Amino acid sequence: MSGQYDLIVVGGGISGASLLYTTAKFTDIDSIALIEKESDIAAINSHHTNNSQTLHFGDIETNYTLEKAEEVKEGAELLAGYLEHYDDDGEMHAKRSKMVLGVGEDEVESLERRYDEEGFGDLFPKLRAIDREEIAEYEPKVVEGRDPDTEMLALQTPDGYVVDYGAVTKSLVERAAEAAGVDVYTGTELTDITPTVDGYTLETDAGRFDCDVATVAAGSHSLQIAKELGYGEDKALLPVAGSFFLADDLLNGKVYTLQMKKLPFAAVHGDADVHDPSVTRFGPTAKLVPTLERGRPSAVTDFLDVFGLNAASFLSYAHILSDRVLLPYVLENLVYDLPKVGPKAFLPHVRKVVPSVELEDIERAKGYGGVRPQIVDTKEKSLDMGEAKIVGDGIIFNITPSPGASTCLKNAMRDTHTIVDFFDGEYEFDEAAFRADTIDNFPRADAAGTPSVDAANDSGAAAIGDVPATDD
């Protein structure tokens, strides 16, 4: 197997699929290939059991600043528009109520301030502040058994898109493959990449490929490949494995708790599984692991390649993990994996969402959870709260922790502009057509306001039968 292409995309997860779709459908690039090492598309972090199934808008993520929420919002609307356009039968998504819950005077005041004073109510017209009585209409179990004298407030929105990112990935690839000059290779592992006079040569276990421009969207492995080419030497990764606890049918939609601003990890939340509404997931937990993929010994060696085993990396880790907020959090999350002790330690987090839950009601989920890379800046000895993109000479590397899946199409849009620039005007990107296919289909709030509680509940009840979201 071999081939010569104008553009090659390495990585068949949601990020690589989004770029393939955008370049194949909305540019006139002649020949494009996608290379994926697994035998199937979306086999690792984009698989629906390996992420939180959340489409992050920035509306209920309380560790987001207003500026970050503005950035994430457009990305989420691009993907939501794609789903609205192409998923009438609900195979890839559903819409349910979504809220962030404040319990107690301090949390209630924090949410009120966020909504009224910090501008989130203006940025998100569908977001509403609701009290205990209305919370109970959406989520009875959230109020049931809670002290009636305890203050409660939630910021709620109907834009609770529950997403099977694996199904979306496959949809994007299928639509891209309809275009002329597009090839998709699965079961094809990249073994080496070498710059040439005209572009890059990619050696794989299935043969050699040559291209003018390359993009690498291989999650944690993107930095590993970048370093092999001399890029990203000032970066390392802090891999975090997420897991979940399961319970029976407790929630209708997604219920978040308030997040710590210093942590890049999602706060514990509860929601119904995307393909089985009778299962409620609580999580994610966040355990530091020395590997780039779960359950693969070779991924430990890959982590060491990315870590670098140098003084800058060790000092960065030491500085980050000595933080008085992060260190207790990391240690606490290690406990959750322990038999018997783990569920008991995690139970208070579950009860913050659903107070009536008992220990015997929850169990550790098997086969759920992936590894998310948190990016470390070894110059600043700090965590970078967000995604990393390295642009080289005719090559782009994307490292996409949460909310990378939510902003996959926005990243693809940006990268497509860069790719077209690499070709010095030989090709064009029709961004207007791209937006017409995606974000223009996103339903906006109108003058009449947001849907009623009954309408939202009706939508949620039907969603899984017809079908909250990734992080990330």
Image (spheres, rainbow, N blue to C red):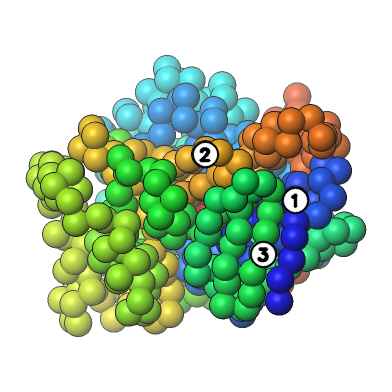
Of label 1 and label 2, which has the lower sequence position? 1
Q: Which of 386 and 152 is in front in this view?
A: 386
Q: In which quarter of the image is residue 202?
A: bottom right
Of label 2 and label 3, which has the lower sequence position? 3
Give the Cα separation between the discs numbered 1 and 2.
16 Å
Residue at 56% from the left image edge and 77% from the top image edge: 205
Give the Cα separation between the discs numbered 2 and 3.
19 Å
| Amino acid residing under circle 3 | Phe
- Residue 441 to residue 364: above or below: above
Query: Can residue 73 be seen in the rendering of this structure?
Result: yes
In front: label 2 or label 3: 3
Q: Which of 411 and 342 is in front in this view?
A: 411
Where residue 288 appears, x then y in whole percent? 24, 61
Q: Which of 432 and 49 is in front in this view?
A: 432
Give the Cα separation between the discs numbered 1 and 3.
11 Å
> With 83 as the anchor, is 59 left or right in this view?
left
| Amino acid residing under circle 2 | Gly
- Residue 446 to residue 163: above or below: above
User: Mark 2 — residue?
Assistant: 392
Where residue 177 appears, x then y in whole percent? 82, 63
Q: Which of 411 and 228 is in front in this view?
A: 228
Residue at 29% from the left image edge and 81% from the top image edge: 360
- Residue 417 to residue 299: above or below: above
